[in-house]
Image (cartoon, rainbow, N blue to C red):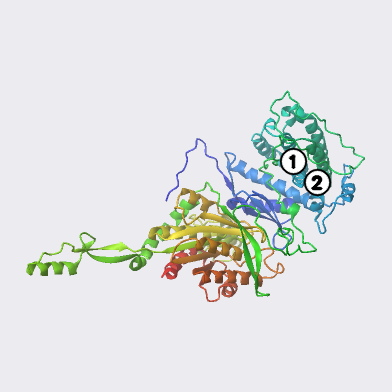
Amino acid sequence: MGIAKSDGAKKHVPAELENVGEVLRLYTKALSGHEIRLVPRGGSSSRGAGWVTPSDDGKAISLRLPPKIDRFPSHRENFGWYKVILTHQAGHVEFGTFKFSFARPAQFFHDWRPGLAEKTAESSGASELQKLRQLFPDPALGMTIFECVEDARIDAQVLARYPGIRPTCRQVALQVLSERPRLGALPLREALLEGLVQASLGGLPLRQASEGLRSSLEAALDLLFRVTNAPATVEDSAEATLRIYQLAAQLPNTVVDDPCHHHHERRPRPADEDATPDRLEETTQDAEEVPFKPPREVEFRLQMDQQLFDRPEPQSESPDEGQEDLAEADVEGPLNRDEPFCYLYPEWDFRTGSFRERWCRVRERVMEESTSDFYTETLTEYRWLVSQVRVRFEHFLPELFRKVTRRYDGEDVDIDAVIDMIVDRQAGATPSEKVYWRRERTQRDVAVAVLLDMSATTNEYVELKSAQAVRPVTATAQGYSNYLHQVAAGVDDRGKPLRKRAIDIEKQAAIVLAQALESIGDSYALYAFSGSGRGNVEFHVVKDFQELLSQRVARRVDRLAPAHATRMGAAIRHAIRKLERVDAQTRLLFLVSDGRPYDRDYGRDPNDKEYAVHDTHQALREAVRRKIRPFCLTIDKDGADYMRAMCEDLPYEVVARVEELPISLITAYPKLTA
C-alpha cells in the first residue's frame, strides 16, 4: 500500500524531535538547571502539547512537544522554533511559575489576595494555585487570564536574561502573530484576552480595538506592562490577573456588529490600588452572549497542564452512599461518565479480593492523522519479512483452503475422476465431465485486536544488534569517541540504524502484522493506550474492525507517539468490550508493551508494583472467561518476572532482541489460531 506524496513548489525541511531531542534536552537543562524530560505529544490529546505532571520520582518535569516542526523553509529556522519553545518553558522553571506562593507578597502591586481570601470559602488541602483559583467567581476565566499574563511575564524575563535568543524569538512571534484572529471578529470578553496575547507577541491590539473594547483593553494593557516591564514575580502576575479579571467580568461576551453602535456603554471602573474589593465581579450576563472560549494556544508557548491548576485534592469525608453524583475530587470514590465515548470499568484489588467498581474511566478517541511516510518506509525496510509472511502463511493452507474434486474446471486434473471417466466409457456409460479439482476457500472466523502500549517510556531508545558491530575492538580514546558519535547519530557508516525508539518498533511490528492479516483475510483492529491517573485512561482507535486498511489508517499509525503511563487493566477491559462486539468464532487479543503496568495511582502508593500486576492478570483472566485468547509480548529484557506473575499459564513472550518483535508477532499468530 502506497501513500501519495504532494509536490510543493518549495519544500520545507522539518526539524524532527527524534533527531534533535538529545541536543534540546541538554539545552533545556543548561537553561533551567533542572532535568526536563522531552516527550513527543500524543496524537489526540485534547490539551495539545505542553506541560504534564511531574514524573514518577516527583522531581523531574515532563514536557510534551510537537514531534516535528516545519513552519519555516530551513531546518535551522525550524530548529530555532524548538529552541524558542524550550527557552520559554525553561523560563517557567527558572523564573518561578511553579513556585507560586499564595501568601508571598507581590513586588509591584498592592496585595488583594489576603483580603479576598478572608471572604472566600477555601477548600481544605487546596494547592497554592487552587487558592488563587478559588478567588474567581468564574475560575476558568480567571485562570485563563493568569496563564496569559504569566506567559507574557516569562517571555519578558527570558529576553532580558538571554539577549542572544531575541532574533529567533522575534521571528517566531511575528509568524504566530500573523495567524492570530482579528479582535473585531471576537466577542468583547474574548477580544480583551486576545488583545493581551497579541500585545505580549509584540502586536498593537489597540489599533484594531472597537470603541466598546478600547478603554477596557487600555486598562488591561497598563496592568500587563507593569508585569512585563519590570523584574516582576509570579505573585505580581497573580495580582495583575485579579485586576484584569475585574475588567473582563464587566464586558459582555457579545459580538459588536455595528462599529458605530456602542453595545457596551459602561466605562470600566478603575481599580483602587489601595483598597481591596470585598469580592471580585460576577461576569456580566447579556441576552446576546455566546459561550466564552479561551484564546487560541500560542504555539511556541504551548499549554500548562490544567492538573497543575486544579488537580483534585483528597476529601476528608466521603460522599453519602445515596448520593448519585459522587464528587470527582474524592480520590477514593467511584467515577462518573463526563463526556461521550467514555467508559467506566472496575479494578481488581487483590488484597481485599474484590473489585473496586467504576474505578477507571477510559476515554476512547480516534487517532489523529500524521503526514509522515512512516508506514511506507516500514514496508520498504521490512520488505523481506513482508514477502516471507506470504510464504510462512502458506502453512495456513490446509485450514484456509480445502481440495474440492469433480469440478468442471479447476487447477489441475482430478486423477480419480479421469479413471472413473475411462471406466465409464469402456462400459458404454456416459462419462462425467467433472474431471478437475480446485481449492475452495473455507471461512476463517478469526478476529484479533492488537493493543499497543504508548506510554512515555516508549520514547526511550533501545540498542539494536547492529550497534555491536561498531563497538571499538581496541580500547583507544579515538575509537571510543568515534563509537559514541555513531551511537549519537543513530546510524552506522552505511546508514543502517543502530538504535530505535520502542514506540517505533511497536508500530513497525503492527504494520507487518497488518500486512499478514490482510493476506489471509482475518478481521483485525489496531488500538493503542496510555493515560494519566484512573480518571483519564486514553484508548486510541487506529483501525477498528469494520474499517478497511487505507491511507487514513496508515497516517494514524504514523501519528502514534509516547504519551503518559501504562494502566493495562482498564485498556484490556475496553479491548475485551470491543472484541465481544465482533461476531467471530476465534477472538484474539495481542498486548504489546515495553514494561510493567504502572500509573501514578495504580496501587496504594507509587512503590506498590503488585497491585498493577494483579489487576492486569485479572483483566487477562476476564478475557479468557469471555472466550478471548490473550497473548502478551514485551520488549523489556527484565520482564520475565512480572510477566510470569501477570500471565501465569497464559501465553506470553519476552522478546530478547527488540528488532525481532515483528517476527515474534508473525510467528505467534499461526500458533494461536491453530
Circle 1 SS class: helix
For the point 21% across and 59% down, the residue is 409
Q: Position of residue 42 (x, y in %)?
A: 60, 53
Q: Residue 571 sits in which quadrant?
A: bottom right
Residue carrying label 2? 136
Mark 1 residue crowding within 10 angstroms, few (<14) / some (14–19) / many (20+): few
Q: Is residue 653 among what the camera can see? A: no
Q: Amino acid at mark 1?
A: Pro
Instruction: Indicate left or right for 148 with 401 as reference.
Output: right
In the foreground, 130 or 221: 130
Q: Is residue 368 among what the camera can see? A: yes
Q: Position of residue 10 (x, y in %)?
A: 52, 36
Q: Position of residue 330 (x, y in %)?
A: 74, 61
Residue carrying label 1? 163
For the point 65% across and 75% down, the residue is 353
* Mark in front: 2 vs 1: 2
Q: CA distance from mark 2 to mark 1?
A: 36 Å
- Residue at the extreme right: 274
Q: Amino acid at mark 2?
A: Phe
Q: Position of residue 646 (x, y in %)?
A: 58, 72
Circle 2 SS class: loop
CB under 8 Å between discs 2 and 1: no
